[in-house]
Image: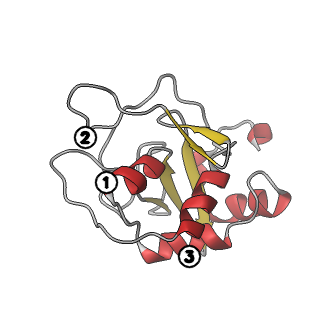
Amino acid sequence: MAHYADLTPCDYFTPDHDGKLIAVGWLARGHDYSKGVVSNDLFARLHQLLVNPWQPCVAMGAHACDFHRFTDGPSQLTLNNVTVQLGVSNLFIPSDNRLFVAPSLILHYIDAYEYAPPAEFCDAVMACPEMRSMDYLKLIRKTAPTGLFSANETVM
């Protein structure tokens, strides 16, 4: 998986992002990241949003946790009897005039490595409408760079 420092522009999905696509949680071995306490509520909300996340495209293949020496790390995380697949999706969180994007492995990084996402991302996660709701999709359309969408307007 590519590494992006938190709150830097993310060109993983399109080079045409006008600085509106902002990376959070793209961790990799050999790169520093913030550590700290993450509330149970934030972790549960991230988990909930990752059950069936909206994405503008589907990646072919999974990403493994770069911190494991001998295995690829976990491929799923279960919380309150609900399982989320890790390494196979990304989470798009609208906020003001930008769109945060985090890999699904963010849950594993928080749980196993004490990763603490930036406060503005955490605030946006807690304020995020339900995944795939009309309110969510309207915010995506409002905040996402045009380069994120294909010519097919039915992607949403």
Q: Residue furthest top?
A: 61
Crowd rating for badge 1 (residues with CA inside 10 Å; few <14, some 14–19, many 20+): some
In the image: residue 136, left or right of residue 1:
right
Q: Residue furthest front?
A: 80
Q: Position of residue 115 (x, y in %)?
A: 35, 60
In the image: residue 148, left or right of residue 80:
left
Measure how far apart labels 3 and 2 are at the Cα level: 27 Å
Q: What residue is disc 3 on?
A: 123
Q: What residue is disc 1 on?
A: 113
Residue at point 60%, 75% (across, down):
96
Q: Position of residue 24 (x, y in %)?
A: 42, 59
In the image: residue 138, left or right of residue 119:
right
Please name whichever residue, 136 or 12, is drawn nearer the observer in this view of the structure: 136
Q: Earlier in the sequence, mark 3 or mark 2?
A: 2
Structure colour scheme: secondary structure
Q: What residue is disc 2 on?
A: 67
Please name whichever residue, 94 or 13, is drawn nearer the observer in this view of the structure: 94
- Which element type, helix, strand or loop, lies under badge 3? helix
Please name whichever residue, 54 or 51, is drawn nearer the observer in this view of the structure: 51
Does 76 sit above or below residue 117?
above
Residue kind at label 1, given as amino acid type:
Tyr
- In which quadrant is the C terminus drawn? top right
Q: Are marks 1 and 2 in contact (CB under 8 Å)?
A: yes
